[in-house]
């Protein structure tokens, strides 16, 4: 495995992927990323579970299930990432998970996520990104506020690149989440190695 200087989490979007999605997941899992959040929000729970079953083979221990707590329990995946609304209403026992993440959009949400047992949070969107077209980015001052509000690791999300990764670390984040780059880059290992420098 390649070592990264920064902690990076990959967030999937199979619709951006131009080659075989599971092959790409395998390559990402072989890189230095800390985890792979299987986001795929357009799927029904049944469709998501079928996809997650295959993704687990490709990602191994790096797989992080998004939202579908019952899927995580069924597949024995010990890592989950929740939107705040879903985190508050979790039905599966949190003790089943070694890693619990949440998407936060304010310092107050970050504090609540920590209080609810999260082991990390994502905060964003920090920079302009095609995923949030037309929405004003929250910027590094917002990120700094979130990082100062909690003692658990914070990952910046939204428009992260080689050029601005140092800015999120300066604001107090341990690392960042990337989506588009990981899904469309020509050379997966090189992309994450370069990003993590």
Image (cartoon, rainbow, N blue to C red):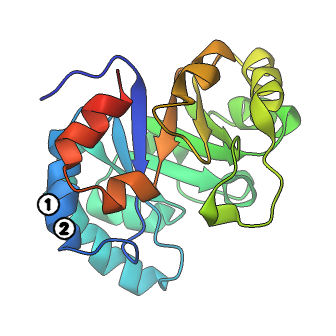
Q: Position of residue 194 (x, y in %)?
A: 30, 30
Q: Is residue 188 left or right of residue 131?
A: left
Foreground of the two, 172 or 86: 172
Q: Is residue 20 left or right of residue 115?
A: left
Q: Do the CB atoms of the residues marked 2 and 1 lie less than 8 Å apart?
A: yes
Foreground of the two, 121 or 187: 187
Residue that numbered label 2 is attached to: 22
- Looking at the picture, does residue 141 appear above or below residue 133? above
Q: Position of residue 197 (x, y in %)?
A: 34, 20
Dot 2 falls on a residue whose secondary structure is: helix
Question: Which corner quadrant of the image does residue 191 belong to?
Answer: top left
Foreground of the two, 118 or 51: 51
User: Which residue corresponds to the image point at 72% horizontal and 37% vertical from the top-left?
Assistant: 113
Q: Position of residue 14 (x, y in %)?
A: 36, 73
* Label tally: 2
State the CA–CA distance, disc 2 to disc 1.
9 Å
User: Which residue corresponds to the image point at 78% horizontal and 36% vertical from the top-left?
Assistant: 139
Within-10-Å neighbours for mark 1: few <14, some 14–19, many 20+: few
- Looking at the picture, does residue 152 appear above or below residue 33? above
- Looking at the picture, does residue 77 appear above or below residue 69? above
Q: Residue furthest front?
A: 163
Residue 13 in sight here: yes
Disc number lying in front (2 or 1):
2
Q: Residue furthest right?
A: 108
Q: Is residue 125 left or right of residue 35?
A: right
Q: Position of residue 52 (x, y in %)?
A: 30, 68
Residue that numbered label 1 is attached to: 57
User: Which residue corresponds to the image point at 20% horizontal and 61% vertical from the top-left?
Assistant: 24
Foreground of the two, 50 or 22: 22
User: Which residue corresponds to the image point at 49% horizontal and 39% vertical from the top-left?
Assistant: 161
Residue 37 in sight here: no
């Amino acid at each position: 495995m390649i070592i990264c200087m920064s902690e990076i989490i990959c967030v999937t979007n199979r619709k951006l992927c131009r080659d075989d999605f599971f092959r790409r997941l395998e390559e990402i899992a072989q890189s230095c990323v800390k985890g792979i959040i299987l986001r795929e929000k357009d799927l029904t729970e049944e469709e998501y579970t079928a996809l997650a079953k295959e993704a687990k083979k490709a990602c191994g221990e790096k797989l992080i299930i998004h939202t579908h707590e019952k899927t995580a329990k069924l597949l024995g995946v010990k890592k989950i990432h929740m939107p705040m609304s879903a985190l508050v209403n979790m039905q599966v026992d949190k003790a089943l998970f070694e890693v619990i993440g949440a998407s936060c959009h304010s310092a107050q949400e970050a504090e609540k996520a920590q209080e609810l047992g999260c082991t990390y949070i994502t905060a964003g969107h920090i920079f302009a990104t095609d995923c949030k077209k037309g929405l004003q980015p929250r910027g590094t001052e917002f990120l700094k506020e979130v990082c100062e509000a909690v003692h658990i690791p914070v990952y910046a999300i939204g428009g992260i690149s080689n050029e601005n990764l140092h800015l999120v670390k300066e604001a107090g984040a341990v690392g960042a989440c990337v989506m588009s780059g990981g899904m469309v880059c020509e050379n997966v290992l090189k992309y994450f190695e370069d990003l993590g420098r």
